[in-house]
Image (spheres, rainbow, N blue to C red):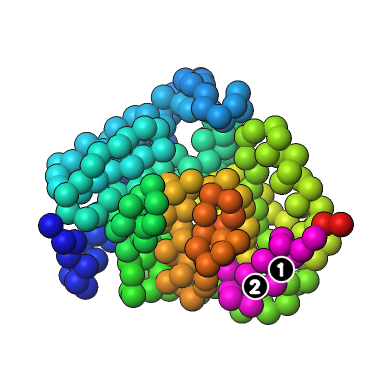
Amino acid sequence: MGEDLSLPALGTLETICRELAVQAGELIVRERPEHLAVADTKSSATDVVTIMDRRSEQLLQEQLRARRPEDGILGEEGASVEGTSGITWIVDPIDGTVNYLYDIPAYAVSVAACVGDPRGEWESVAGAVFNPVSGELFHARRGGGAFLRSTGADPSVTALFVSGEQDLGQALTGTGFGYDAAKRAQQAQILTRVLPQVRDIRRAGSAALDLCAVAAGRLDVYYESGLNAWDRAAGQLIVTEAGGVVRGAGAQPSRDLTLAGPAVLVEALHDVLQSDPH
């Protein structure tokens, strides 16, 4: 079955992204244990999973199976459902789990509807990222622009646009680090090349929120290596719909490198990252 990507269909997908991101976000705040513990680890002892990561992903998977039974699902904590519709939902039940573990209010739920092979070539067509502590809901659909919606007392909606900064030397730059010690050492070396070339560096601990910060102009540009599909599926669409570009070392973002921001800054930062360190 071919996927329906008409404007009404994209609007429906975006609405589902928004609703499920908020539902899962409210769950992880409302039912966060007083003494939250690590339930498991993944790539290293510092790459943690909590029981609420699993409960959030379970909620997302159950809701998607009920609403969209023909669609596929790919989740950070192991959800993998093959679909027949051509649509796959890529979800991150808590992006910024270490922040969540330490009760630092910089974590989010990310939900994206994608076409293509989620383990190969794919494209996001609708997405939402929800910070349940701030109540900020970032969302977009292909061709429809990007928006920030408040779920608090003031239900305002604001169109998002990337920064107008053109000078990399004046660019507030976001990044993140992996959990593997060898990877971190490599990222530290890269940071020593980037830091002298930009205004300053910010590392918030949630790739999804970093991408949304770029879309909102709160960060001028962003780079990170080691991102998985669920880290960036919603956020990269929100950036592009806010007028930015998202790329990697080549034309497309990849696990090796993701760059996001206004085109001129992305290209300038790409040149710095690809320069010979010697």
Task: Measure the C-alpha gap from mark 2 to mark 1.
Answer: 6 Å
Is 186 left or right of 237, judged from the image as shown?
right
256 vs 20, nearest the viewer = 256
Q: Can you give x and y, in whole percent of width and height, for residue 137 in the image?
A: 40, 57
Q: Can you give x and y, in whole percent of width and height, for residue 182 in the image?
A: 71, 35
Disc count in the image?
A: 2
Rendered residue at 62%/34% (across/down): 179
Q: Residues within 10 Å of mark 2 (few under 14, many from 20)?
A: some
173 vs 73, nearest the viewer = 73
Residue carrying label 1: 271
Quadrant into which the N terminus falls: bottom left
Amino acid on which the number 1 mark rests in the picture: Asp
Q: Are marks 2 and 1 in contact (CB under 8 Å)?
A: yes
Rendered residue at 33%/74% (across/down): 144
Residue carrying label 2: 267
Relative vertical location of residue 104 with respect to residue 251 in this rendering, above or below: above
Residue segment shown in magenta = 260-276
User: Is 270 covered by the magenta stretch?
Assistant: yes
Q: Residues within 10 Å of mark 1 (few under 14, many from 20)?
A: few
User: Is 88 covered by the magenta stretch?
Assistant: no
Q: Can you give x and y, in whole percent of width and height, for residue 28 in the image?
A: 40, 35
Amino acid on which the number 2 mark rests in the picture: Glu
Quadrant into which the C terminus falls: bottom right
Q: Can you give x and y, in whole percent of width and height, for residue 62 in the image?
A: 22, 36
Q: Secondary structure at mark 1?
A: helix
Q: Answer whether residue 196 is visible to the viewer in this image.
A: yes
Rendered residue at 29%/32% (across/down): 58
Relative vertical location of residue 227 with respect to residue 277 in this rendering, above or below: above
Residue 2's mark?
Answer: none
Relative vertical location of residue 35 with respect to residue 212 in this rendering, above or below: above
